[in-house]
Amino acid sequence: MPYTTRGSLLSRVRKGDEISWEEFYNTYKRLLYTVGRESYNLNIGEIEELIQEVMMTFFDASKTFKYDKSKGKFRSYLKTIFKYKALKFKDKKKKTAEKITSVESDDFSIDNLSDPTDSNLDKIWDAEWEKHIMHEAMKELRLKIEPTTYQAFELYVIQGETPKAVSKLLDMKVNAIYACKNRAIAQLKEIIQEMNE
């Protein structure tokens, strides 16, 4: 499925398009999962529950939400929903842990409920956002350039094969490998710039 701009995807989600909603969910689930694990030290079940709450909140808000670049980046909006839901989730978990502690024993600890500072959460979010954008950009790149160009780029740049080895493997001249790399990088930069707008 070709990459669509965030604005058009959000517009289709707002109109109730189920395929677009699934695309949105699959696009952002990995990001939310990693940030939940690294920021709040949640287990798999807890992260999945948190993701569901974030997605439900966004889904409810999407009926009236209009993406306006002048008011800020979409990633900031999504991070705000995530942080709000994560803090609510953490408070709920802490209250449950306190009830268990008072009933069961003094050995129970809620130290695993890390409480990241805003700057720590921002660092984790920003790092994961960059990985998220690169992952999505690479998927889009594969669709936008010729398969041979992508294959040469992947072997040479991503897998670290020598241009000579790639030229032998793909039956291309070494200069053609360099040209494929340059075309792919130029296209990748355009895709990333578009995604970051």
Image (cartoon, helix red, strand yellow):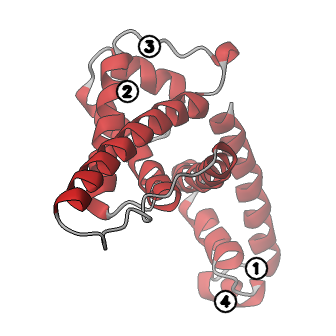
Q: Which residue is mark 2?
A: 58
Which percent across, then down, holds residue 135?
55, 56
Query: Residue 82 shows which numbered tag?
Result: none
Nearest to viewer (mark 2 / mark 4): 2
| Relative vertical location of residue 49 with respect to residue 77 in this rendering, above or below | below
Disc nearest the viewer among 3 and 1: 3
Q: Which residue is mark 1?
A: 173
Q: Earlier in the sequence, mark 1 or mark 2?
A: 2
Q: Regarding mark 4 in the picture, which secondary structure is present there?
A: helix
Q: Which residue has dot 3 on it?
A: 65
Question: Which numbered marker is on residue 168?
Answer: 4
Distance CA(mark 1)–CA(mark 2)? 50 Å
* Residue drawn at the location 46% of the way across and 33% of the way down: 84
Residue sitting nearer the eye, 39 or 26: 39
Q: Amino acid at mark 4?
A: Lys
Label 2, label 3: how far apart the Cα atoms are: 9 Å
Amino acid beneath label 1: Lys
Q: Earlier in the sequence, mark 3 or mark 1?
A: 3
Question: Separation of disc 2 and disc 4 at Cα?
Answer: 50 Å
